[in-house]
Image: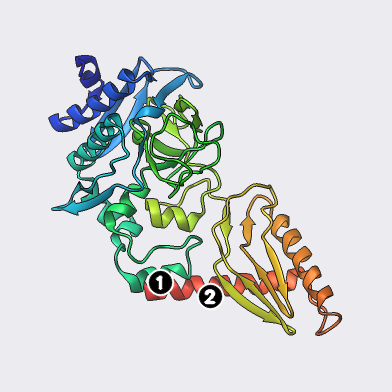
Amino acid sequence: MSSSGRERVHTDDGSVREWVGAMFDLVVRHGGSVHPDLWVVEQDGSMSIHVDGRDGQRLMHVPAAILVPIGRVGIDVVADELVVAEPDDELTAVQRESLDVHLGLYNATKKMSWARTALPEVALAGQPAVVETLGRLHRRALRHDRSAATAFLATRTISFDAGRSSQAGTDDVRSDGQPEGIAGLGAERRPVLMPLLDLVNHHPQGAPFRGKADGLRARVAHPVGGTEAFVTYGADKDPIGTALRYGFVAADAHRTKVCPVEVELDGLRVVVEGRSHHVKHPLDPPAVSIDGSTLTLSHLTIDADHPQRVKVALSMAVQMATQSRCGAGGPITGDDVLAAIVRADRAVTDSVVGEL
């Protein structure tokens, strides 16, 4: 690779300099770009992106050809290093090179050793009893057989959806509107690694990054002053989800989903399933089903900035359920049900924390 790429890396570790330099080389060689005054800082395994430039300027463009779909790649941990155990024959030569560079950098910065102590989902991977306990609390199902390597790589991926805002740190890649530039995706939802952009840290006022048909783009944002540039992982992250996955509660977390709970009031049984749900409407209405005296809600989202939204959604559902009962039982309001659900949610949270 060119010497200019290595010179952009501020580190005392020569192997880190080489791996990050290789990422720069991949981006530029395949039609991408980085801000001319961008550099990378590494200290004790932690990485950050810095740039002398105005907010709003292009930070980087990562071409689609080097994004790595890793859903069918088997990754193991050997002596705290990530290794490819089962390769994916559908990866292109460039994608295989990109994967090697990612794993090389993760190993050089001892990411697995760090993740086992800093990221709860990684630390708890492979413990069925604990995963089952967290499943009562978490808004997203956790697989019992998930390995530590899979849990770690899930924190480094992006949901790539051409033409829309892409959210970092998700388990899947949306199949609708997929760009043709990424080989091996087809109609499946698969996680994708993202060179260089993976090194930019999160801040609630960071820049959103977007997926286009030709790759990923991000702009410069300095929300805390200084030279470090930040992106945002998305304002709709659940606080418990970020705590388990990333090891921190996002300062901008203002939405949370109710745990899977069941409550009963005057003969009306209300079930909140807590299913994973992509928000498509500001009210985030749940899917509702009514079977006799049972009202089932796919999920229930509480938005601290708009508390009336959950009341509206729940009141409508309760009204539908009480009408279907044809006068059976006493009068029930949405506020009554919401209060019972919040109490149940808190009880679940307290019990899970006590078990852990």
Q: At numbered mark 1, what does the secondary structure look like: helix, strand or loop?
A: helix
Q: In which quarter of the image is residue 6?
A: top left
Query: Residue 238: horizontal and vertical position, in percent?
Result: 51, 54
Instruction: Please tell me in which quadrant of the rendered image residue 38 appears.
Output: top left
Quarter of the image with the C terminus in it:
bottom left
Instruction: Provide the residue designation for mark 1.
Output: 132
Q: Which mark is residue 347?
A: 2
Question: On screen, 3 above or below 153?
Answer: above
Q: What residue is drawn where x is 35% and y is 71%?
A: 130
Q: Is there any visible trace of residue 228 in the rendered image?
A: no
Quote the CA–CA distance across marks 1 and 2. 17 Å
Query: Disc 2 residue type?
Result: Ala
Q: Which amino acid does label 1 sit on?
A: Glu
Residue found 45% across the figure and 41% down from its top: 186
Q: Residues within 10 Å of mark 2 (few under 14, many from 20)?
A: some
Q: What element carries label 2?
A: helix
Circle 1 packing at 10 Å, graded few (<14), some (14-19), many (20+), is: some
Q: Is residue 205 visible?
A: yes
Q: Which of 168 and 52 is in front in this view?
A: 168
Q: Where is residue 42 in the image (x, y as percent from the top left)?
A: 24, 33
**Is 250 rendered above or below residue 295?**
above
> How many numbered dots are placed on residues in this image?
2
Q: In this view, does 201 lie to the left or right of 311?
A: left
